[in-house]
Image: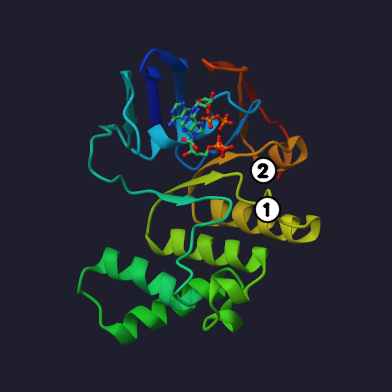
Amino acid sequence: PIKIEVKNVNFGYGETEILKDINLQVREGEFIVLMGPSGSGKSTFLRLLTNLEKPTSGEILIDHLKLTKEIPDLAVVFQDYSLFPWLTAEENIVLALKKKWKGKKSKKELFELAEQYLALVQLGHAAKKYPGEMSGGMRQRAAIARALSMGADLLVMDEPFGALDPITRIQLQELVLQINQTQKKTVIFVTHDAEEAIMLADRIVMFSPGPPGKILECIDVPFEK
Ligand code: ADP
Ligand code: ADP
């Protein structure tokens, strides 16, 4: 089944064209990596997918539904600022869960659920830590746990591991692959690192230098993951 359909999308700020003639179909459960030079519009494309911006023309369908101003069922992980610094890892996740369950679960149940998500990303031991007390890798694990706890089946990640040391980065790559494969989450992931792209992607979408950025080519990655 098709998860995302981007049809003839154009986007610009005023007179400046930022993205031109974007067409892309993403299958459910597919791992898409976006690459391309700085300024080619990758982040802008993510902002369109996450409904933070509206295309100037064309349309985006998620689960065959046209993206409107309503917040779609997806979760976003950015390079850093994904967590609230004044909440512990566990409280950050409880906050997301609260929104999702809207009074249908007790506080105790929400904290139990948060614990399960933290355990899933191997962060059970750090539930009571504030983001400022965690390493970059731990913060990204917590951000991923929070994204999963929202129940979204689409994960959008903008250079999420760019600031991590190489060992932590490999661990988190394995975590996100495992989530993609065992939980059938569709992933849209931006990176500048070709090795990371090849290790993670089912398909690499290359943007040409912008503005305006265009899709230069889509490359199937034939390797077993
Ligand atoms: P990438 O993520 O590929 O580096 P971006 O999507 O961040 O590219 O940016 C694409 C182009 O859009 C760049 O030329 C950038 O300067 C421009 N741009 C991004 N945001 C805005 C904005 N709010 N107003 C005007 N131009 C913008
Ligand atoms: P990234 O490298 O992740 O694409 P940027 O540093 O390009 O991020 O952009 C950071 C923020 O600044 C984004 O919210 C983007 O929309 C905004 N921005 C980027 N370029 C411009 C621009 N020329 N005018 C206004 N805002 C911009």
Quadrant containing the N terminus is: top left
Q: Position of residue 48 (x, y in %)?
A: 39, 32
Q: Is residue 102 above or below residue 202?
A: below
Does the CB distance between marks 2 and 1 fall below 8 Å? yes
Does residue 209 appear anywhere in the picture?
yes
How crowded is the residue under tag 1: few (<14 C-alpha within 10 Å), some, or many (20+)?
Answer: some
Identify which residue, 196 or 163, lies in the foreground: 163
Amino acid under label 1?
Gln
Q: Nearer the viewer, residue 192 or 80?
A: 80
The picture places residue 98, in percent across and down from the top left corner, at: 29, 70
In front of the other: 139 or 120:
139
Q: In terms of secondary structure, where does tag 1 sit?
A: helix
Q: What kind of element bears circle 2?
A: helix
Image point (63%, 68%), residue name = 138
Q: Residue 20 at what x, y percent from top left?
A: 46, 14
Rendered image: mark on residue 200: 2
Seen in the image, is 173 located left or right of residue 51? right
Instruction: Identify the mark at residue 217; answer none if there is no mark.
Output: none
Residue type at numbered disc 2:
Leu
First in sequence: mark 2 vs mark 1? 1
Q: What residue is disc 1 on?
A: 173
Identify the residue shown where x is 38% and y is 27%.
5
